[in-house]
């Protein structure tokens, strides 16, 4: 329906009749004709002017923020869907940040299977290529002849865990004009890890020596952020705590009594392999030479480690910066 | 009503490039427009509490306040002052105790070097530049977005330090128990460098919560070749080491910023 | 032949004298010699040879002018086929989509027979575009269907074929199904090195969406609009048309969301007046009359000042030269920025602007060309440039003026539509009041829910007034419907 303008028709006045020759030169004006008997339409009434909207109706760049009848939402597709995809993660360097008596640096890898968009199964492995007692512990030994209890200075060589990962929160940020989307991730897992203990520190007599202290149950808890970079790459940054129980009662599989037997044999000048030890004791780890040093000298050091029973729960808290390939 | 929506006659785009130019004119690719939280030109007061992370020989709990002016959205100048409640950890006490139990008169650890990283940051006053290039939001339980900024802070100032030795005891009260009545206590003021990584969570137009990891670094200072017998007799002993290294105090601070 | 004048619009097929074709290789006779030969002997062959020489020296526009001179003699001239082929090649060099194609379209149909296959196909493609503009759709279709599939411009010609097939004025009626197939063929092509390929793909995607809309396959149309890449030249248009498609598909919230993208600050410099009209319409159809009026108010606040700024330019004595100056120099233009952006958003016009710039470039080069300095050829070529410049300037200015006037006419038309909506909304409100319906109660009883999530690979954000660039195009509205019983307006 459109507004129709009513056209007004006005008849023009009829022509004037010719007048008789006037007596004078001044002629009276011709008589006006009557207009047609029509009632003119009233002029169209203009619409009331546009009023500014009320506070409720006010728009912010076209969006009604306060209108109770309308609401704006954002339903945004994820840049790249992850469900059903595998992700290979490499953490080239994983430095420990809570090292008190020990210090670990390692390399880790993880295989993640995204079961759903925000839930994944993980398989994680880490090898600590640097696992030593810390410089703080060495300072205590050097200066005040004190050191941490054995359990508190247990070293983690490697760990393998299976677990889960959830991404309960998602977000985005702008770094100047670059937009990055990320998700917060929480992970947890359980597995095993191999431990050892330092027997002799690195000094003038030679490099450090270690004794194996067996595998332990390993748990991990972690949190971090994951940034998707393109369809096939991602970046991960977080912290992860590898937790393991530390109770040192054997070194290289040898208990305290085994070690005493070995030490007696050593002091008597005999061969360590003829000592009476338990089946799990790895005598060969105390035999032979390590550089110019007799490995049998580790026996009394191993006795020191297991002599006073100690236990602890250790956590290796590390920073994990990883690069992912999403398959 | 003959509205176009009802009877659209779609004009098919004619000709190559007839409809549009080669670039998307009219679109501004700025990442975020009409930000809800803009710090530019704001003055903030930020009280905070902090505690030391990864304690070894000392512990530190701080309370302080900062005053910052954001001259642009991503840069601010800040001054901060804090007081620390500090002391030795149980490990330091245990080391001291076990050392005192060794009698230097018996030749047991007669000469020792003092331990590093024993200085406590009792108070500090620092100033620095804060750079907050990251502005973002997190969907909290898929409902309310939480807006945040992350920042880097770099600056320095002066630290008021206190140190109590664990090897220099001037008065042994009990050898058996390993207790000392008068350790060497030192205080000094020293330049301090501070670096922080922080997260600001906007709580509304007038304030925001601040969570940061802050590191204080200053030069260490301790004595070596301390003769414990001389020290226990009340004498002066030991020399300052020439290369003491640096001490780092890593704090986690939680604060709130009030915009003035 | 002093005046190598290009009269593109009314190009005559004048017989002229056929001239002997002097197949003089340009490398043996320089430009001055060829010029003299062409001028003195009225030698068409020399004119074509001059064209080749000019092209070799970096004067493609002048080269085309001398080939055009040969074409004026008609197919009887021996040099005609060579000149025609050369002109087809020069069109590609100059990337002109208006003047030279129009000149080629004016040649007789039999002229194609003497061309070798590739220039023949290309000429058919170029003249098809002219036929399309002039409404000769059957002719355009025939030429486009003759373009071989392996031609370098086959993507563009297939797209154009789709456009022809979907035109309502096609004899026998539009063939939308065939048009859709043509667009799909373009979209299935592998990426090509041709720099225009991506542009053609974008256009094909947009045209596909429009065709689906015309076929009333609304849901598919929406998907096709959403497939258009972000921040490409067609994106804003796609967002707007997606609004129509969603509205017709019965998704007012989605429609309003698509339109909201165009009102974000990132699109502040975009010209989208009709988006407000559509928004108001959608609100009207949901009996949200306050919201409809708010949209019209926003339209009024944004576009009435623009219309008033355009009025003196559009209605007054704006010369083509002034219009050209407004559009060719954005930094100094007096036009409102959104109008300027929209007016410049025409590839054909911009190519003519580029042609004008090419004339200036060749003029400057001519003045600095030592090999021609002081020769009769230099003077003659300069005269040719000047003569052609007038035409090109006139064409460029006319296109620019038309664009500005079109912007004004559009705004005027939308302003009228806004008044209609306002009237209807007021009338509908009065009707409800007279019937005793309390709309506020109806609205208060309604609820607003979150929109359904299409799947787990979607993130939801509550909108709070902040505009993130990656969210543009993903807004969704939820709105109440205040229509009571049979009050709901019917879509026609």
Image: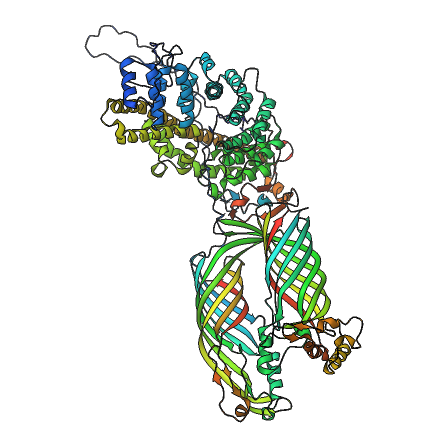
- Name the colour scheme: rainbow
Looking at the image, which residue is at 44% across and 25% down?
Answer: A42
Q: Name above or below for residue C73 compared with residue A163.
A: above
Q: Could you say which quadrant of the image residue C41 lies in?
A: top left
Whole-percent x and y of residue C114? 45, 14
Which quadrant would residue C88 be assigned to in this image?
A: top left
Q: Nearer the viewer, residue C460 or A296?
A: A296
Would residue C16 be visible to someone looking at this image? yes
Q: Provide residue C152's location: percent of width, then percent of height.
A: 50, 26
What x and y, as percent, mark residue B93?
60, 82
Q: Is B110 situated above or below C416?
A: below
C348 sits to left or right of B176: left
Residue C460 lies left or right of residue A176; in this view the side is right
Q: Residue furthest left?
A: A24
User: Can you name the residue that lies furthest to the top here?
Assistant: A20
Q: Is residue C147 left or right of residue B79?
A: right
Q: Quadrant of residue C378?
A: top left
Q: Position of residue C325 (x, y in %)?
A: 33, 32
* C131 vs B78, nearest the viewer: C131
| Residue B56 visible (yes or no) | no
Q: Nearer the viewer, residue B89 or C37?
A: C37
Q: How many marks overall?
A: 0
The answer to whether residue C212 is above or below residue A51 is: above
Along the line of sight, which residue is nearer the eye, C7 or B49? C7
């Amino acid at each position: 329906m459109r507004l129709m303008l009513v056209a007004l028709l006005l008849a023009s006045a009829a022509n004037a009749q010719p007048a008789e020759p006037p007596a004078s030169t001044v002629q009276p004006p011709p008589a006006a004709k009557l207009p047609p008997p029509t009632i003119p339409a009233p002029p169209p009434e203009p619409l009331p002017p546009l009023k500014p909207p009320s506070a409720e109706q006010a728009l912010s760049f076209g969006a009604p923020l306060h209108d109770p009848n309308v609401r704006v939402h954002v339903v945004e597709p994820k840049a790249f869907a992850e469900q059903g995809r595998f992700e290979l993660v490499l953490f080239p360097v994983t430095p420990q940040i809570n090292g008190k008596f020990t210090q670990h640096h390692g390399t880790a890898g993880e295989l993640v299977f995204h079961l759903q968009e925000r839930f994944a199964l993980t398989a994680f492995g880490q090898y600590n290529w640097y696992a030593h007692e810390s410089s703080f512990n060495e300072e205590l030994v050097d200066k005040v002849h004190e050191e941490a209890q054995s359990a508190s200075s247990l070293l983690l060589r490697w760990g393998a865990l299976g677990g889960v990962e959830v991404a309960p929160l998602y977000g985005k940020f702008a770094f100047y004009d670059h937009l990055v989307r990320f998700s917060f991730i929480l992970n947890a897992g359980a597995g095993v890890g191999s431990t050892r203990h330092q027997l002799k520190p690195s000094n003038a007599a030679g490099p450090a020596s270690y004794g194996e202290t067996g595998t332990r149950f390993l748990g991990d808890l972690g949190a971090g952020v994951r940034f998707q970079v393109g369809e096939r790459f991602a970046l991960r940054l977080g912290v992860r705590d590898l937790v393991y129980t530390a109770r040192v009662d054997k070194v290289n599989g040898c208990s305290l009594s085994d070690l005493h037997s070995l030490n007696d044999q050593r002091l008597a000048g005999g061969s360590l392999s003829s000592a009476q030890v338990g089946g799990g004791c790895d005598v060969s780890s105390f035999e032979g030479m390590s550089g110019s040093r007799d490995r049998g000298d580790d026996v009394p050091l191993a006795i020191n480690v297991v002599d006073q029973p100690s236990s602890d729960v250790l956590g290796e808290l590390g920073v994990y910066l990883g690069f992912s390939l999403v398959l | 009503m003959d509205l176009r929506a009802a009877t659209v006659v779609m004009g098919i785009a004619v000709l190559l490039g007839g409809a549009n130019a080669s670039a998307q004119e009219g679109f501004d690719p700025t990442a975020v427009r009409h930000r809800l939280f803009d710090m530019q030109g704001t003055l903030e007061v930020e009280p905070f509490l902090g505690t030391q992370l990864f304690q070894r020989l000392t512990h530190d709990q701080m309370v302080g306040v900062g005053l910052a002016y954001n001259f642009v959205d991503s840069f601010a100048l800040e001054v901060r002052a804090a007081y620390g409640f500090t002391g030795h950890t149980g490990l330091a006490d245990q080391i001291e105790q076990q050392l005192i139990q060794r009698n230097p008169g018996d030749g047991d650890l007669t000469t020792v070097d003092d331990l590093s990283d024993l200085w406590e940051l009792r108070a500090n006053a620092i100033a620095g530049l804060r750079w907050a290039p990251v502005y973002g939001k997190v969907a909290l339980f898929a409902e309310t977005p939480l807006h945040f900024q992350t920042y880097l802070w770099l600056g320095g100032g002066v630290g008021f330090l206190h140190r109590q030795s664990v090897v220099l005891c001037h008065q042994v009260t009990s050898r058996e128990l390993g207790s000392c009545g008068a350790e060497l206590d030192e205080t000094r003021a020293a330049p301090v460098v501070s670096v922080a990584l922080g997260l600001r969570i906007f709580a509304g137009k007038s304030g925001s919560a601040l969570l940061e990891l802050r590191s204080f670094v200053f030069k260490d200072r301790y004595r070596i070749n301390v003769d414990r017998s001389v020290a226990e007799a009340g004498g002066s002993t030991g020399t300052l080491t020439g290369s003491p290294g640096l001490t780092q105090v890593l704090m986690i601070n939680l604060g709130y910023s009030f915009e003035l | 032949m002093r005046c190598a004048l290009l009269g593109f619009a009314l190009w005559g097929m004048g017989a002229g004298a056929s001239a002997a074709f002097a197949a003089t290789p340009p490398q043996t006779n320089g430009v001055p010699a060829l010029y003299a030969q062409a001028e003195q002997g009225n030698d068409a062959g020399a004119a074509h040879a001059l064209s080749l020489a000019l092209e070799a020296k970096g004067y493609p526009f002048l080269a085309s002018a001398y080939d055009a001179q040969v074409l004026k003699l008609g197919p009887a001239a021996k040099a005609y086929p060579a000149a025609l082929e050369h002109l087809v090649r020069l069109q590609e060099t100059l990337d002109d989509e208006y003047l030279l194609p129009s000149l080629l379209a004016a040649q007789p149909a039999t002229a194609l027979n003497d061309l070798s296959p590739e220039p023949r196909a290309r000429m058919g493609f170029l003249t098809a575009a002219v036929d399309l503009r002039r409404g000769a759709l059957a002719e355009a279709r025939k030429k486009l269907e003759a373009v071989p599939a392996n031609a370098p411009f086959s993507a563009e010609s297939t797209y154009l074929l789709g456009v022809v097939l979907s035109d309502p004025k096609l004899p026998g009626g539009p063939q939308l199904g065939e048009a859709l197939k043509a667009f799909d063929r373009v979209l299935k092509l592998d990426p090509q090195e041709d720099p225009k390929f991506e542009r053609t793909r974008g256009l094909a995607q947009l045209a596909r969406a429009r065709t689906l809309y015309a076929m009333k396959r609304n849901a598919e149309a929406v998907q096709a609009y959403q497939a258009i890449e972000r921040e490409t030249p067609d994106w804003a248009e796609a967002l707007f048309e997606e609004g129509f498609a969603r509205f017709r598909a019965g998704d007012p919230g989605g429609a309003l969301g698509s339109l909201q993208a165009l009102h974000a600050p990132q699109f502040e410099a975009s010209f989208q007046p009709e988006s407000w009209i559509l928004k108001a319409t959608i609100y009207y159809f949901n009996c949200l009359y306050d919201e409809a009026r708010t949209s019209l108010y926003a339209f009024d606040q944004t576009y009435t000042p623009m219309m008033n700024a355009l009025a003196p330019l559009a209605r007054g004595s704006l010369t083509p030269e002034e219009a050209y100056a407004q559009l060719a120099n954005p930094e100094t233009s007096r036009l409102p920025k959104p109008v300027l952006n929209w007016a410049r958003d025409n590839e054909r016009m911009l190519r003519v602007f580029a042609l004008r710039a090419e004339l200036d470039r060749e003029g400057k080069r001519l003045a600095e060309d030592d090999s021609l300095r002081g020769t009769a050829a230099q003077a003659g070529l300069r005269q040719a440039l000047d003569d052609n410049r007038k035409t090109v300037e006139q064409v460029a200015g006319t296109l620019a003026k038309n664009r500005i006037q079109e912007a004004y006419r559009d705004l005027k038309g939308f302003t009228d539509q806004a008044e209609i909506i306002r009237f209807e909304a007021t009338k509908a409100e009065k009707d409800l009041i007279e019937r005793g319906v309390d709309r506020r109660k109806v609205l208060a009883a309604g609820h607003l829910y979150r929109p359904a999530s299409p799947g787990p690979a979607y993130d939801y954000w509550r909108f709070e007034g902040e505009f993130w660039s990656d969210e543009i195009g993903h807004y969704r509205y939820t709105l109440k419907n205040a229509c009571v019983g049979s009050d709901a307006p019917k879509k026609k």
